Image: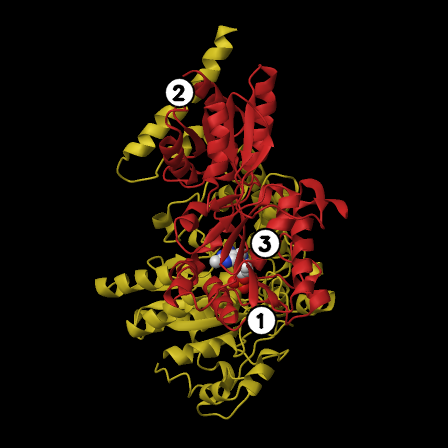
Amino acid sequence: MTVESTAARKPRRSSGTKRAAGAASAAKPAAATAQTQDAEPQLVQLLTPQGDRVDNAENAEFAPFVADITTEDLRGLYRDMVMTRRFDGEATALQRQGELGLWASLLGQEAAQIGSGRALNDADYVFPTYREHGVAWCRGVDPTNLLGMFRGVNHGGWDPNTNNFHLYTIVIGSQTLHATGYAMGVAKDGADAAVIAYFGDGASSQGDVMEAFNFSAVYNSPVVFFCQNNQWAISEPTERQMRVPLYQRAQGFGFPGVRVDGNDVLACLAVTRWALDRARRGEGPTLVEAFTYRMGAHTTSDDPTKYRRDEETAAWESKDPIQRLKAHLLATGGADEAFFAELEAESEAMGKRVREAVRAMPDPDTMAIFENVYADGHALVDEERAQFAAYLASFESAEEGH
Amino acid sequence: MAVEKMSIAKALNESLRKALEQDPKVLIMGEDVGKLGGVFRITDGLQKDFGEERVIDTPLAESGIVGTAIGLALRGYRPVVEIQFDGFVFPAYDQIVTQLAKMHARALGKIKLPVVVRIPYGGAIGAVEHHSESPETLFAHVAGLKVVSPSNATDAYWMLQQAILSDDPVIFFEPKRRYWDKGEVDTEAIPGELHKSRVVREGADLTLAAYGPMVKVCVEAAAAAAEEGKSVEVLDLRSMSPVDFDGIQASVEKTRRLVVVHEAPVFLGVGSEIAARITERCFYHLEAPVLRVGGFHAPYPPARLEDEYLPGLDRVLDAVDRSLAY
Ligand SMILES: Cc1ncc(C[n+]2csc(CCOP(=O)(O)OP(=O)(O)O)c2C)c(N)n1
């Protein structure tokens, strides 16, 4: 399959002429402004919100990438989304119960994460932010491992190399450069693998992200930039981050950008497979903008009623990624009630396991403060560790003395 | 007199409000400072009252925030920028250190950079990584920047006023764990100098010097020590650049012992500089070496370990005992 330049590809544009639409909109800020405010922008979609398959010229380039998907695969994607949502809901509840200090919910973003996550091969490498619980699920990271950081017992909780899933990155945008560098290494090694970096619409304002775009273009690195545009960066709407539709930004750096319906798991799978394929074939980076919505608060510390209208949230409810696939499975006879009931039981069991695991998670040993500060030893750390141990021991001997 | 009891958060909010009212050149900039009023609500209601041209929600880009604030200052504005959390100032560190700090000198004093960078800092709020750090030394080390931190509501109110009025860039560290502590604020009082230390509690046997979140811990330690018959003086330094060495010296000449307390790592911290200077200035007055209490040479730990990591009453009292034992 040949890939044309971004300028020549037409379906993801929301307005403008066929050729060089990106360039045209870049030259006309007013048009670009109108586009960002477009309520229903055009995007690659394979399943409508009602669950009907879409077959049109807009997605013809991508549909072949899911031609092999069987009904069983669809049930698998559905299961992934349900389990992920259940896990996320459980974590939110655990935060409310005081078991976690904070939680960043992915509610509403399941399709973007499962679709992209299931597009990956084992050898591919993922650089997530702090909200990629669904991608972690696809990588086989034990969900309970994701909770340590939010409980406050560690800063990560898993070995990134076990599942080729890097640690969560909280500093916005940083990981896009790590992904780019990792991809540069993959290319140098001549490995048959690609790298995917996740970030949000707000992150696209960071200089690091712009630098990652540029490095990856200059070095033709096998990296896919997967932006979940969930419309908000805490209280700031996308209008406060950009004036040109996000996916179009890739063009200025010299690689393609695609906008996909982020609530359509099949479309996310197809577009990510397409982008990863390009990367593995040595055709360089791609920017995928998954157009989706953050249904909940930014994190459990946030209060969206201060800045967001209920009507907006309600409008997105009707585009729910899980309901959409369920409707499709039911309409096509792809799944019956027994399947849904079994899945309900399975997710219930997983929720129970997560609850129990979190409550049983021990606080770290105090001396862990001094562990792993350096790979080699360090005299200052050794000295402070010894002093602090002696200080703590003085309490014990004082107690014995009484 | 207009004395009112308010939290530190409220005092900062009132201070910003007053600055916006008094000078049309004052601007507030940062992530989520508008409708949300900032994640700590320090800018609550300001955009509603002063509009989006004065209280500006910025794109999510710290280098951009500080870099454009520099440009606005060059154009005659007085931007007060908010960095959401301590650990997120580093994307802007380049702009602060290589540009903001040096421009006045490079321009032979012909241009002024009245930019205030507000940073909620420090731990003890049970947060995830990058939300609990104390990077003040990294700024105090840089010539051209002033670095201050209030510890109570009155200082929060007045020091922020003074920082905004200053023609130099000021890094304004706000002790986030104390945001909800209340105190009396006289909004019409004539404030003391921005960089002068303050004796919080008089004492005769030893001086505890601290700033920001640790002042309260030291006051509690002094009270506990008093029960054991030890008379401890507590000094609130208020400013890390410049440091009021004269104030510390005066106290140490009286008490002859000094312990410096901060959350930031001890190694090469503000306390190290104070220990060195006071040793030079007061060598013949000192009965004990200057001791320091603070964080370790280790990344800020996960929340469940922060109580052990942060200096608390026991660690301060232990240092008091060690000093008095000399
Ligand atoms: C460098 C930096 N600045 C500020 C923050 C505080 N912060 C955490 S999440 C967030 C908004 C992120 O929005 P977006 O990139 O759209 O991702 P989303 O959370 O919506 O998935 C902000 C401002 C941070 N983590 N890192």
Circles 3 and 1: CB atoms closer than 8 Å: no
- How many C-alpha atoms fall within 10 Å of the one at disc 2: few (<14), some, or many (≥20)? few
Labels 3 and 1 positioned on one and the same chain: no
* Three-letter amino acid code of the residue under disc 1: Arg
Write the residue at 53% across / 81% down: A55
Labels 3 and 2 positioned on one and the same chain: no
| Residue at which label 3 appears | B162
The front one of A333 and A355 is: A355
Q: How many marks?
A: 3
- How many C-alpha atoms fall within 10 Å of the one at disc 1: few (<14), some, or many (≥20)? some
Write the residue at 39% across / 68% down: B107
Q: Quadrant of residue B56?
A: bottom right
Q: Residue furthest top?
A: A402
Q: Which chain is yellow?
A: A
| Residue at which label 2 appears | A390
Q: Which chain is red?
A: B
- Chain hosting mark 3: B
A328, above or below B305, in the image: below
**Quadrant in which the N terminus of chain A is drawn:** bottom left
- The answer to whether A120 appears left or right of A321 in the picture is left
